[in-house]
Amino acid sequence: MDLSLVIPTHNRHENVLLLLDSIREQDLGATVIEVIVVSNLKDQVLEKKLKAHKVPTSVYFTGKIGVNAARNLGVQKAQSKNIYFLDDDVLLKNPKHLQHLLTLSKKHKSMAAIGGSYLLSKKAGLVDEIYHQISTAWMNKKSTYLLGGNTLYHLDSIHIPFHFNEGIIFGGSETELNLRLHISGHDFLFLESLNIEHDTHLNAFSLAKKALRQGMGRSFHEDIVPKSFWSVDTNSSQDILSRYQHSKILYYSALCHLALYEFFFHVGYRHGKKEHNGPLSLKVVFTSMLKTFFQVDSDKILYIPNPDATPFHQKAFPSLKFKEFHHWTKANVWWKIPNFIFWKAVPPLVTVFVCALWTLIPFNTIGLRVPYDRAVSRFERLFKKEI
């Protein structure tokens, strides 16, 4: 077996079938490959569709949520030591792609991994373009980062246990493994020519979801990843906006989606610093709004204690000590209702409102535009070293 293709998926039947169609069009010659599709949950409809497809495919189910669990199961079932991971929303447009990949694999056998880039689909909309430019900017960093949806790993060249961290179910799920390999002395190769088409079909809500998960991933990896890993050249952020530049102005709809991504990235990042599960706090949402929309350093406003300030519980209930107040609030059902509304229900409602605001207002049709320099400034803040 020359190559094992591992495709993790979750509720994307049509995307997987389109990917298999593109694999079927590959000019393989004498190359022997296997295709492994791993779904998070038992899916009989997907299993039936894949069995009917002309590309022979092995189908497995993990019973767990998370792309890393699917990747690990795919590695266990693979017959080849050359494992190529693909996302379920990509297409191999070049019929020589897999042949090119294997040629590179033989030439650079000492590399632990070989990765490539994403191309924007011709059917991409504005939101897809925005996200593509953001992900391209991350790839321009001088780092060991490789895309989990377009990377070949040489298991014979890896000298430590090869295992994705299944506890990471948010953005950047492959980064932790790549970092462990890098620290262990393994080398990576990134080649722009090894590109595949990324067919995302994003809208404002899915962009916000991606940003939220990637912000959480950033907060998780920040403690174990060197600061140099996150560095990015200033010129890269300016290049992102070059395709939207028209007479030194940028349409407001594009900038609004950039701000939307930035806002939810900050929400995910700040939420991840506290905990990776559970509801968002109103404090996290509010501080992210200050930082994103008003360019205010919320840390200086909210996180520096005032020694003269009187705690809220002492103002409202001066006769109660803190522990007594804590037990009283847990026992009093009338306190639980406003507590739930303002601290559990409000943050999701605020975030949905932010999404709806950008989705419903037709910025292009009313001709709102902003200075190009201001848009560049926003990107520089998004990609600077510190959040």
Image: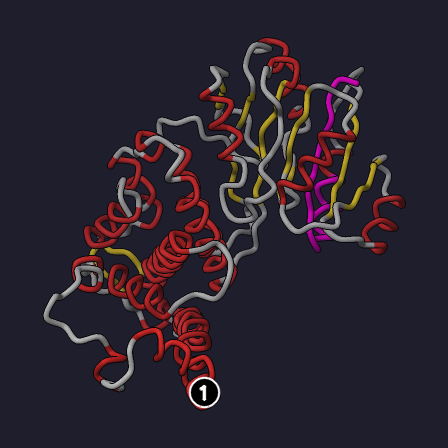
Asked whether 377 or 100 is in front, the reply is 377
Q: Quadrant of residue 317?
A: bottom left
Q: Quadrant of the N terminus?
A: top right
**Colour logic:** secondary structure
Q: Nearer the viewer, residue 350 or 331?
A: 331
Residue at x 47%, y 63% (from the top left corner)? 204
**Residue 367: image x %, image y %?**
30, 69
The spot of residue 100 in percent (x, y) is 63, 19
Counting from the top left corner in percent of width and height, residue 153 is at 61, 23
Instruction: Indicate left or right for 27 with 210 as reference.
Output: right
Q: Is residue 325 above or below residue 225?
A: below
Q: Which segment is the magenta one?
A: 1-21
Q: Is residue 190 magenta?
A: no
Q: Between residue 326 and residue 36, name the one nearer to us.
A: 326
Q: Secondary structure at mark 1?
A: loop
Number of marks: 1
The residue to which callout 1 is attached is 332
Asked if residue 137 shows in the view, the reply is: no
Q: Identify the amino acid type marked 1.
A: Asn
Up/down of 57 relative to 201, above or below: above
Image coordinates for residue 371, horizontal then vertical, percent: 20, 57
**Near-viewer residue (319 or 369):** 319
**Would residue 197 appear left or right of 225 to someone viewing this image?**
right
